[in-house]
Image: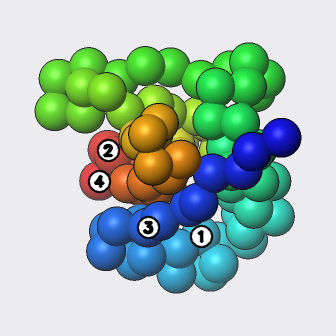
Amino acid sequence: MSHYTLVYTKQAQKDAKKIAASGLKPKVQNLLTIVEQDPFQAYPPYEKLLGDLLGAYSRRINIQHRLVYQVLEEEKIVKVIRMWTHYE
């Protein structure tokens, strides 16, 4: 089974600090492990995003926050764009 490499945008790195401070880290860690193994795994459900984030996917961290990522299939890379709410 091939794994994907996770890369983080500057924004995602900033979000990671908020995640750590908010106590959501275990949940996020779990989601990151899932997308690292298979970014298209059906569970937990994900959405394809539109508009500015066309081509990206989102999975719920909780009611408010989302993990948003892009998949670079050729390079086997998952680019983590956001790990915090996009409503701030």
Q: Which residue is mark 4?
A: 88
Q: Earlier in the sequence, mark 1 or mark 4?
A: 1
Q: Earlier in the sequence, mark 2 or mark 3?
A: 3
Q: Which residue is mark 1?
A: 19
Q: Which residue is mark 2?
A: 87
- Mark nearest the camera among 1 and 3 is 3
Distance between the alpha carbons at the discs numbered 2 and 4:
4 Å
Q: Earlier in the sequence, mark 3 or mark 4?
A: 3
* Quarter-of-image position of residue 37: top right
Residue nearest the viewer, comparing 39 with 1: 1
* Quarter-of-image position of residue 13: bottom left
Q: Amino acid at mark 2?
A: Tyr
Query: Which class describes the residues within 10 Å of circle 2: few (<14), some (14-19), or many (20+)?
Result: few
Residue 41 appears left or right of 11: right
Quadrant of the drawing holding the N terminus: top right
Disc 3 element: strand
| Picture residue at 59% right of the left edge, 70% below the top | 19
Q: Amino acid at mark 1?
A: Ile
